[in-house]
């Protein structure tokens, strides 16, 4: 099963992608996580990506596409995957489409997690991410058991640099300009499904599993 998660930054794509990956036993592939891991390890790719991420801009397509195609070519992705944060532009979607078509494959579902802009800034300022394992929490809605500490690996939880309100505004603009057109793209392909992302995390997941079966 090949699934794409669509939605504004902070809509809950990552939260739902992790639940989907667990239930359907497919890898969770997040370009944002790949970039952050590279930044943490001080790689050249990480340094390049950071320039854009800190501004709330997209990392250039050429670089992003190369990283993503490498990742999905790995053995663990051969029975499918859930893509979180890719594609984010029409050119990215076209490259993915061509690569899949060449192998006689296609995307099964593009799930659009719908959350209005008004809710987004609040979501993002409350988001806390684990420095080690990448787990995400929300200080009000999805709190960790112990404040500031990851439930899974007990490492420290931080506010991501790009989750500060000024950067969030940029990211929302970038989303509307460059990513939202993908809703049309996947509607035309007949694979788009929209779920209400404003309800509880478990209710969003229920709506998704009703679609995926
Ligand atoms: P969010 O969880 O808020 O949607 P991500 O973790 O997916 O954010 O992405 C963080 C940042 O990484 C983005 O703002 C962007 O700079 C970069 N990034 C991630 N995926 C892509 C992509 N497919 N294309 C371009 N840039 C990306
Ligand atoms: P995205 O990957 O789309 O950027 P995340 O999954 O990281 O979004 O979620 C953004 C923030 O909102 C996180 O702090 C997360 O814990 C919280 N969150 C996710 N889903 C919900 C929900 N259904 N209700 C309330 N908060 C949520
Ligand atoms: Zn952790």
Image: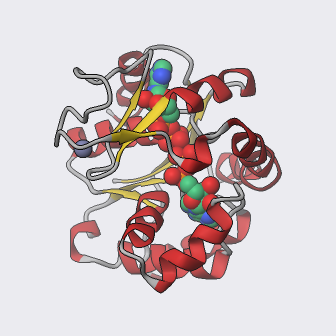
Question: Which residue is nearer to you in this view: 168 or 26?
Answer: 168
- Name the residue rendered at 48%, 62% in the picture: 31
The image shows residue 210 at horizontal and vertical percentages of 38, 25
> Residue at horizontal 26%, vertical 70%?
78
Q: Classify 1 as above or below 123.
A: below
| Image x and y of residue 46, in percent | 49, 75
Q: Quadrant of residue 112?
A: top right
Residue at the extreme left: 153
Q: Is residue 188 left or right of residue 199?
A: right
Q: Is residue 156 among what the camera can see?
A: yes
Left or right placement of residue 143 versus residue 48 in this view? left
The answer to whether residue 9 is above or below residue 34 is above
Q: Quadrant of residue 115?
A: top right
Tag count: 0
The answer, for residue 194, to whether it is visible in the render is no
Q: Position of residue 37 (x, y in %)?
A: 38, 66
> For this rendering, which residue is in front, 202 or 145?
145
- At 39% across and 41% down in the image, what residue appears? 129
């Amino acid at each position: 099963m090949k699934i794409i998660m669509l939605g504004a930054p902070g809509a809950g794509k990552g939260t739902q992608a992790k639940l989907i990956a667990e239930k359907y036993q497919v890898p969770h592939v997040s370009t944002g996580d790949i970039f952050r891991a590279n930044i943490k390890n001080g790689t050249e790719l990480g340094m390049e990506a950071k320039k854009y991420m800190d501004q709330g801009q997209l990392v250039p397509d050429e670089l992003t596409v190369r990283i993503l195609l490498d990742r999905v070519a790995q053995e663990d992705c051969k029975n499918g995957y859930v893509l979180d944060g890719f594609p984010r532009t029409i050119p990215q979607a076209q490259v993915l489409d061509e690569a899949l078509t060449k192998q006689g494959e296609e995307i099964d579902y593009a799930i659009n997690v719908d959350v209005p802009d008004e809710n987004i800034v609040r979501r993002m300022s409350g988001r806390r991410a684990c420095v080690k394992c990448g787990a995400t929490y929300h200080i009000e809605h999805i709190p960790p058991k112990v404040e500031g500490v990851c439930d899974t690996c007990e490492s420290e939880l931080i506010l991501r640099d790009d989750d500060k309100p000024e950067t969030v505004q940029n990211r929302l603009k970038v989303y509307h300009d460059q990513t939202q057109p993908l809703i049309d793209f996947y509607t035309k392909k007949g694979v788009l499904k929209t779920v209400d992302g404003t309800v509880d995390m478990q209710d969003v997941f229920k709506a998704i599993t009703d679609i995926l079966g």
